[in-house]
Structures are given as structure tokens and as C-alpha cells.
Image (cartoon, helix red, strand yellow):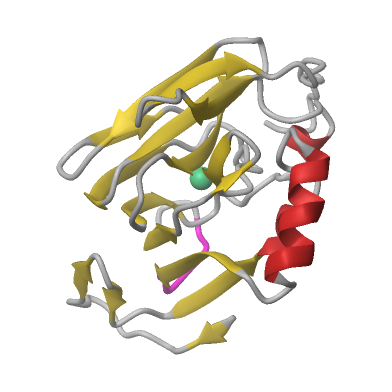
Amino acid sequence: MTTAPVSIPAAFTVSSAGLGGRSDNYEVFLPRLAGVYSDDGAFENQLAQRGADELVYTVDVHSYDNGPGSLTIGTSTLLPGKVGEEFAVTRGHLHALADRAELYYCISGRGVMLMDTLGGETRAIEMTPGVAVHVPGHWIHRSVNVGDEPFVTLFCYNGDAGQDYEVIAAAGGMKTLVVDDGAGGWRAVTNPNHTGYALDTTTA
Ligand SMILES: [Fe+2]
């Protein structure tokens, strides 16, 4: 993570190259995706072949505060790829303050916003440039790249939202997998390892 102070009000640029004028940036490499994909053998093979410094996604952030009225604005750039039949994914999370919603807007590439509720609803919405998805509070969410170029989205959420990644791991993964349909597209299939989410009251 690199951090640079920002002054507000601020103007910054948003493009398929990310944010110009970001306050933070982080990179997620393949080892951080351990246990995320349904095919552990395919993941281990890919890790052995590509190595621990294989970049999966990067995030640029423009943020000045983590108070409830502030905004965290950024871009997510998820590189293309597959692990087994499953397309490349971000780790995914429920907001630590679970009622916090989020906007995603596709800048470039082709992807899917995959969303689950703790109660068992699931959605997979395709995103192409110009498409926005309004992720309501209480929905777990993850980006999936189903194309052959970086999938770049602009996101915006309340600065106090936080992220809970463990809720997915504890459930054996998200309810739905986005896999290659063998015809140049994608399809959503039920994750056989998903055990259901714990209805944990620690997430408000
Ligand atoms: Fe989020």
C-alpha cells in the first residue's frame, strides 16, 4: 500500500488506467487467492507455474477520511484469466458494516458482478463499459473477469464500510461460480463447496 495525502475538494481523473490523483494503491498477487477458487488442484498448478508474484488485481483509491459520511472512491483492475473452468475473481467481501451499499461502474473490459445475500439469494450481472451495478447493503460482492482484457471498474462506497473477507471463506466460497461456457462466454453454476452463510449478527 502506498499512501499519499489528498486535499479536498479534489479533482482527479478516472480511466481504464486507474485513478490519476489517488491517495492509496494496492496490488493483490496470486497467493492471496488461495482457497478462493473451487478447484484447489488447478490453483496449485497455476501457482507453481506462474509463481507467487503473479498479479491478479490492483486497486486505486481516493479517500481522505473513514467517517460515515465520507466516500471512498476508486478503481479496480482485474486481469483476465481462469483457474480451472472458473474465471478470474477478486477475493470478494461483505462490508464490515454490512448495510453499506456500493456503486460499481464498468470503464473497460467485460465482467460479472457476483452477489450473494447471507440468506441465500444470488445474482450474477454482466458488466460491459457503461453499465453500472448498484450493490445494496447486506450483499456480498465480488468482481469476475469473463473477458480477455483487464476488467476495470469505478467503485464508490461510504468510508466507514470496511471489508469482511472471512464470511466467504467460512461458507466454502460464494454460492455461485462464474465459469467458461465453452462458447466464448460465461455461465453461472452452483458452487458444490458452498455450505451456506452463517447468519452472524456481528455484522450490523
Ligand atoms: Fe465493497
> Which residue shows up at 54% across the image and 86% down it?
2
Q: For this view, does 183 lie left or right of residue 1?
A: left
| 117 to 102, vertically: above or below | above
Image spot of residue 120 (x, y percent): 64, 10
Instruction: Say whether residue 66 is magenta.
Output: yes
> Which residue shows up at 78% across the image and 54% down it?
45
> Which residue shows up at 66% across the image and 19% down it?
175
Q: Nearer the viewer, residue 180 or 171?
A: 180
Q: For this view, does 69 lie left or right of residue 19?
A: right
| 177 to 33, vertically: above or below | above
| 112 to 66, vertically: above or below | above
Quadrant of the image occupied by residue 41: top right
Residue range (magenta) = 62-67
Image spot of residue 137 (x, y percent): 49, 29
Q: Nearer the viewer, residue 196 or 190?
A: 190
Image spot of residue 138 (x, y percent): 56, 26
Image spot of residue 68 (x, y percent): 48, 52
Q: Nearer the viewer, residue 116 or 16?
A: 16
Which quadrant would the C terminus be assigned to in this image? Answer: top right
Instruction: Say whether residue 160 is magenta.
Output: no
Question: Is any part of residue 31 visible from this angle?
Answer: no
> Which residue shows up at 42% across the image and 71% down it?
60
Q: For this view, does 43 lie left or right of residue 127?
A: right
Which quadrant would the N terminus be assigned to in this image? Answer: bottom right
Quadrant of the image occupied by residue 182: top left
